[in-house]
Image (cartoon, helix red, strand yellow):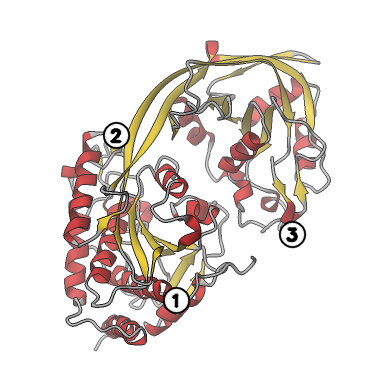
Amino acid sequence: MKKSSLLLLAAAAAILTVFSATGQNTKKPTTLQEEEMLLRQWCKTLGSDEFGGRMPMTPYETKTINYLADEMKKLGLEPAFGNSYFQEVKTISAVCKPSGGKFKVKGSKKRVELNSPDDLVVWTARETEQVEIPKAEFVFCGFGIDAPEFNWNDYAGVDVKGKIIIAMVNDPGFYDASLFQGRNMTYYGRWTYKFEQAQRLGAAGCLVLHNTAAASYAWNVCATHVGSNLALYDPATRNAGELGIKGWLHEDGCRKLFAAAGVDFDATIEAAKHPGFKSFVLKAKSDLKMDVTYEIQETCNVAGVLPGTDLKDEAVVFSAHWDHFGFGTPDETGDPIYNGASDNGSGMAAVLMLAKKYSELPVRPRRSMVFFIPTLEESGLFGSEYYCAHPAFPMEKTAACINFDCIAPEPLTHDVVVLGGGVTELDNYIMACAGAQGRYVVFHDDNSDGWYFRSDHFNFVKKGVPAVVIEYGKDLVDPSRPNKYPRSDWYHKPSDEYKEDWDFAGTLVHVNMMFGVGLSVANADHHPRWYNK
């Protein structure tokens, strides 16, 4: 018998071991062949042209979410949101530009103009037709980080209220491996954190200073913000508490601004990379005006619940986003549909498969199981952000979140790569279930591109819920059969389409492993704990 076949049998045996250990036994377990057939069918359907690339707030959203709700109902799941499988998520999309296409700055040394989109791109999430910040002052705050655990505070001794913050992208560890977590970016390095912190401190705006190496992408990615910018929308406040101006500042634009204020750009940026740097207000002001065209829309998260038993008021969440990019620039074959069969038809298929497996247990898990399929992951994790603020089960009663993103096609591997591992007791459950399959766990230790912060699980982490994503392994069981469809060939392209020769061997083992993990967490006496709390 081939080694790959032995490992698949071991995976099946491992799941039966979990049942036995928890006092549960299936009458007729679904075979691996049947599971593969279902996973393929869900991937094929959700990634088909009929679903038009699953773009939110289009008719294809209606088709997608109705299909998911129907599948959940067939699987015996109860609606997660009262009597509905749908959670409405209100959004605001805005196209913004400086009035006249530029900001005029008067500095102590000279006057300059910051042009959009060459020098900067700006936007807002406020419901307004124009943002005006007269006589706006600029304050350079290094990385814009306040991190007590790393003994770093760029805001010490400087008042930023009502001012425009300029903050470098990434964190000090990118430049000095002895600082923060070295090249592994912390959340303090993400541009989203810079905006959040600026808002907490009462700033009028924040411009993140771009650097291609530190950001891991070129300026053209930032320049896409000249188009529509999406955000969650609160009709009660009309988003009045949001920053007046968010944006990216090109290094050339920053050089202009610093020169106007009589500041040495190179020396200042270098100093900001080291402990002891003092932030300062630039000797430059601008009457900032930005024109805004906005639209209020609505999209939906989808979720079903399998109620638990004695701990049914607590939950384990399984998540996978449903949204993708719809119709876009055609590829070389003329195909304009970004089907998203892997990203994230495969993740949704995994969540539906787990719902089926748990619903067929003769004895339900102690905790309730939430099967959560959020919207707007591709646009900024907004669907999961909204859910975490308005959850079906309180965050303090949510034991864990297990997130699936792009899990097929995937060949069989000896290793299990865990993104988000090494920080909670969830590790123990993963290592036990992987070990029962004859596999070993590798914690993803390269987060230099900030990937850990770019999938839906991270919104749960921000609320204190242990959460992980299981990624592709590298230690192939059969080295002669590598993945025929590497991620670089299809990621965010029309070529992300289901193919009959997709390899599901690794996908099946991953799904069954996480079935064991979820069941163990659901039946445990306490939630997985954080190691550092």
Q: Which residue is mark 3?
A: 178
Give the class, few, some or many, for how many residues have Cα within 10 Å of label 1's Cα (few <14, many ≥20). some
Q: Which residue is mark 2?
A: 57
Looking at the rendered image, the disc whose residue lies closer to the viewer, 1 or 2, is 1
Tell which of 193 and 44 is nearer to you.
193
Relative to 159, say whether 64 is above or below. below
Residue farthest to the top, as pictured: 100
Residue 92 seen from this side: yes
Image point 50% across, 70% down: which residue? Answer: 527
Image point 51% across, 51% down: which residue? Answer: 453
Give the class, few, some or many, for how many residues have Cα within 10 Å of label 3's Cα (few <14, many ≥20). few
Image point 73% across, 32% down: which residue? Answer: 140
Relative to 372, say whether 377 is above or below. above
Tell which of 66 and 362 is nearer to you.
362
Circle number at residue 186: none
Residue farthest to the front, as pictured: 310
Q: Secondary structure at mark 3?
A: loop
Q: Amino acid at mark 3?
A: Ser
Q: Which residue is mark 1?
A: 524
Q: Rounded to the nearest whole Å, what is the CA distance between mark 2 and mark 3?
A: 46 Å
Q: Please provide percent x and percent y for residue 55.
A: 29, 38
Give the class, few, some or many, for how many residues have Cα within 10 Å of label 2's Cα (few <14, many ≥20). some
Looking at the rendered image, the disc whose residue lies closer to the viewer, 3 or 1, is 1
Q: Amino acid at mark 1?
A: Ala
Name the image quarter holding residue 353: bottom left
